Amino acid sequence: MKILVCISNVPDTTTKITFSENNTQFNTTGVQFILNPYDEIALARAIELTEGGNGSVTVINVGEVNTEPTVRKALAIGATDAVRINAKPHDAWFVAYQVAQYVKANPFDLILTGRESIDYNGAKVGGMIAELLDLPSVSIIKKLEIEGTNVTVEREIEGGKEVLTMPLPIVAGCAEGVAEPKIPNMRGIMSARTKPLTVVEPVEIKTHSEVISYETPAPRGQVKLVPADEVAKLVGLLHEEARVI
Amino acid sequence: MPVLVYAENAEGKFKKSTFEAISYARAIANQNNTTLTAISIGNADAAELAGLGKYGAEKVLNVSNDKLKNFVNQAYAAVVAEAAKKEGAEIVVLSNSFSGRGLAPRIGVKLEAGVADGAVSLPDQSNGKFIIKRLAFSGKAYALVELTSTNKVISLSPNSYKVVETGSTAVVEDFNPEVKASDLTTIIKEIVRSTDKVSLPDADIVVSGGRGLKGPENWGMIEELAGLLGAALACSKPVSDSGWRPHSEHVGQTGIAVSPNLYIAIGISGAIQHLAGVSSSKVIVVINKDADAPFFKVADYGIVGDAFDIVPKLIGAIKEYKALA
Ligand SMILES: Cc1cc2nc3c(=O)[nH]c(=O)nc-3n(C[C@H](O)[C@H](O)[C@H](O)COP(=O)(O)OP(=O)(O)OC[C@H]3O[C@@H](n4cnc5c(N)ncnc54)[C@H](O)[C@@H]3O)c2cc1C
């Protein structure tokens, strides 16, 4: 079983998001970059599925050289090898196209992504890769099991869940429940330095979208405190002032 | 160029998020002085379909094909893209629901369209551009994205556009595009819907509990409060990590992002990762015994107190208010 896990390099979850150059650039000063938390879940499941020599896990990242620490982290966690497509990840379409191009030349049995990246939250890369490769896709899965050449996934729906089966290969976006993220151990960290990391040059394509600028939400007003012995007042405020009940 | 909106149904019934998407698509059609067609796939009956006219769809394409009874990404995306071509639609609108997230990127590829997902505003079309405001950085910011392609796909964030009733009834037309067998290899084995629960992503009111509630056995009062308010239940990440509540209720940066009219946070500290997914709620109420909990910094209303004391009192007060109202 050959599994491909798409990984993204994102600002740490504690990052205070600010912008520079007249709100046109994300301000990366002092920002720590990490492996996207959902991708960690996808990677963990891929490692579980290939345990005991039952295949290999390749991680792929579209990014410039500064994403290599994140790629090495994935290798330390347990990926077999890595591919970095040497380009700025312009938008979901650009990323998906590069990955699909790579997969056309190097087929996989299963392609996993995180359900979304925590920076642009598009949840689009997986679906786009699937469409470009004409494969089934499922977004936001909570479980993934493989039996022979069939895969069973559980997907979230509003107020419930759905269980689906389909033949491999597929593209699936992993969310919590699929696996527990793995922490790299010393051996993993040591071996990550020598595991193969292939750098591939991108294919030129026309892009479809452009971030023009960013905005931060307007700061909220001050909190109105209701004394603990006058709880009923809160109900009045929510009804008369906030008009939400 | 007409606008096409995908009208998602759950077991034949259209939902509020679908009405939001249609209202939003109607406004885009008005901006461009054009018509709006809706497409429905699955088992909605004639009255439900015609009812989509209320929100401004002039025409509804109805696909009722047994093979397409249940949602399959690949096949549904093919059908919606076909409908867009048939209608000559350059703009396709859908809701950023769980299914919408599966569909939007596939439709985007089929139509060679830029995709703006999680849209929270109407497009700004001044100066011949097409710019959409969307959520980014897990709700910590917005990105203004220009779609530069001719075709465009927009998925609307739930609760970010009001349902507007403008039209009357729509003309319903059958639509039977060819579906490839290779698009139908997905088999739905089981669908579990809890009909007694309010769905979290598009709920108007959300009642959320954190580690301050000490254990799953204390959720009775949270459920009672939610029941009284017709609210959906939610929780912080450690709560679902400990198995007190299902993962599907976990909100925040790595959970579901919500933007209800009212978010009530009980025994939740307000860590940056939690706030990321809830801070676009219109009104936030925080109940926490620690006056310094960071959540109070983003709350509109707060009570500093013990949840085990405050929540029962709040339940009592709401019952009283309901009896009066
Ligand atoms: C990569 C990453 C992603 C994350 N993603 C998320 C996410 O998506 N969502 C999320 O929620 N968290 C997320 N977290 C975790 C986050 O950092 C916090 O740990 C978490 O939000 C804290 O949950 P809590 O407020 O319920 O618990 P705690 O931090 O334990 O806080 C409990 C609060 O309850 C109060 N309290 C205690 N007893 C009572 C009482 N009797 N009455 C009233 N109040 C009481 C306390 O004063 C305290 O403020 C993430 C963390 C990481 C590292």
Image (cartoon, coloured by chain):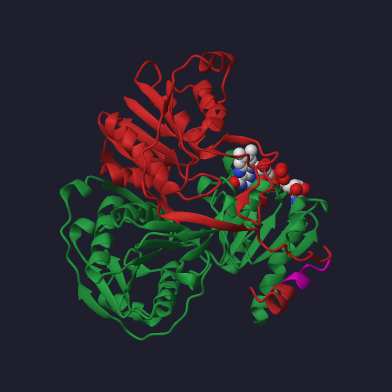
Q: Quadrant of ligand 1?
A: top right
Q: Is A180 contained in the magenta span? A: no
Q: Is A231 contained in the magenta span? A: yes
Quadrant housing the N terminus of chain B: bottom left
Query: Which residue is located at x 22 percent, y 49 percent?
Result: B183
Q: In the image, residue A63 lies at what x, y percent? A: 49, 36
Q: Does residue A66 lie above or below A238 as drawn? A: above
Look at the image and give the residue range highlighted in magenta: A229-235
**Between residues A180 and A199, which one lies in front from this camera angle?**
A199
Quadrant housing the C terminus of chain B: bottom right
Please indicate whether residue A144 sits to the left or right of residue B179 in the image.
right
Q: Chain A colour?
A: red
Query: Which residue is located at x 45 percent, y 70 percent?
Result: B128
**Between residues A106 and B70, which one lies in front from this camera angle?**
A106
Please indicate whether residue A188 sits to the left or right of residue A27 in the image.
left
Q: In the image, residue B194 lies at what x, y percent? A: 43, 57
Query: Which residue is located at x 53 percent, y 30 percent?
Result: A65
Please indicate whether residue B234 sits to the left or right of residue A222 in the image.
left
Q: How many marks?
A: 0
Whether residue A100 can be seen here = yes
Magenta span main SS: helix
Q: Chain B colour?
A: green
Q: In the image, residue A55 lies at what x, y percent? A: 34, 21
Residue A84 figure quarter:
top left
**Between residues B149 and B311, which one lies in front from this camera angle?**
B149
Whether residue B214 can be seen here = no
Residue B19 figure quarter:
bottom left
Residue B97 figure quarter:
bottom left
Q: In the image, residue B275 lies at what x, y percent? A: 66, 52
Q: Does residue B320 lie above or below A7 as drawn? A: below
